Amino acid sequence: MRAGPSQEEIRRHNLGTLLRHVHLSGPTSRAELAGRMGLNRSTIMALTADLTAAGLVREELPRETGRAGRPSLVVRPESARVYVLAFDVGVDRLVAARVGIGGVILDRRETVRPRGGFEMPEVVAALAGFARQMHRKTRPDTVCVGAAAAICGSVGRTDGVVRFGPNIGFKDAPFGEELSKRLALGLPVTVGNDGNVGAIAEQSRGVGIGCRDLIYLHGDVGIGGGIVVNGQLLGGLAGYGGEVGHMVVNPGGRPCACGSRGCLEAEVGERALMELAGHSTELTGREAVRAVVDAAGRGDVRAQDALHRVGDWLGLGVANLVNIFNPEMVIFGGVLRELYLGAAAQVRSRINTSTLVASREDLRLRISALGDDATVVGAAELAFAQVLADPLEVLSRLA
């Protein structure tokens, strides 16, 4: 029979919990931290002293108190000193960011690329080049505590291998390992599917703050999804859970890049919308979807019909997810933001006719609050996970 947690384990847990509060909530008083964590002020003082000595936080007097008596010191994240590298590999862009603890984007690089298959060595070299540019601008006392990437493909839970990324041409690509080698920081690179990473971002820093059951849908050429159940990301046995874009909504429908037909992403994706609306394929991404929505608003009958049909399939897909998972919130990100805004009535109509009343009665439909930054913000949160779990141990290894 195992004894209870040791004092060191309790201390490690409390350090991580306190740091997480400050990382997610920003400057927080000692008194508020004591209340949130259920600890006395002397314990909070000892914990903040340890984190301050490690360079993870700093303490200072509040600017204004509005109360009589001795003010409680405010604990702030050392955003300029402790950071992670966050990357996003999309179908038409590469993004790299240096993100300070507390979620502050300190530096950022982005390049737009023509769509089509990517060569992994080229992508890795471009992202590593961005990282070197940002590193040259850091102060000598800064420390990188993690690295992570979001990518539009199916990613293994433990090895960072992109098993299948049809829209970027990756298959069984050891992306995490290769990027880690090129960065040469002695740190592994965590890799996550863009839908899963976006769900993490919206729950921690976006429209889903405080929501423990949500579904995030991310659209570009395809559709990815992240499902959060009782506060935890649903990853599945090997990490491939949440591939909602390949849920079949129209058997025998449009061919999908995965080899099936009638998948949600085939019926709702950008290509389907543009084809139905009769629009040129010269525009892509958000601009293309916005052009169809604008045309529908001006009375273009074909654009209106396209939005209606695509909105119906999107609503059916959401209805299936609502019946299965009973989420509190469904969030539309990427190009699905514009698509949902243009077809909200049809999406809601389909949900109302195809879901159980009990499953939808408290449902909220929202667009992403983080916009195009959702995936890179989520990647940063992945990269911070280890230091938030055991702050001092991580820093001791990097010292």
Image (cartoon, grey):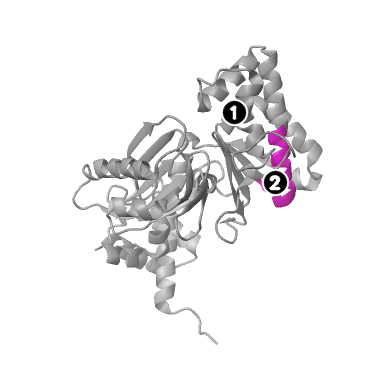
Question: For this view, does 361 lie left or right of residue 38?
Answer: right
User: Looking at the rendering, which quadrant does residue 270 occupy?
Assistant: top right
Q: Position of residue 99 (x, y in %)?
A: 35, 46
Q: What kind of secondary structure does the magenta stretch mostly adopt?
A: helix
Q: Can residue 76 be seen by looking at this rendering?
A: no
In the image, is residue 25 above or below residue 287? below
Q: Amino acid at mark 2?
A: Leu
Question: For this view, does 152 lie left or right of residue 215?
Answer: left
User: Residue pushed farthest front?
Assistant: 259
What residue lies at 54% left-to-right and 23% top-to-bottom? 288
Q: Amino acid at mark 1?
A: Arg
Provide the residue designation for mark 1: 271
What residue lies at 41% left-to-right and 45% top-to-bottom? 66
- Binning the other alpha carbons within 10 Å of mark 2 as few (below 14), some (14 to 19) or many (20 upward) gives some
Provide the residue designation for mark 2: 321
Q: Point out the frontmost of discs 1 and 2.
A: 1
Residue bounds of the magenta highlight: 313-329
Q: Can residue 140 be seen by looking at this rendering?
A: yes
Q: Position of residue 148 (x, y in %)?
A: 40, 51
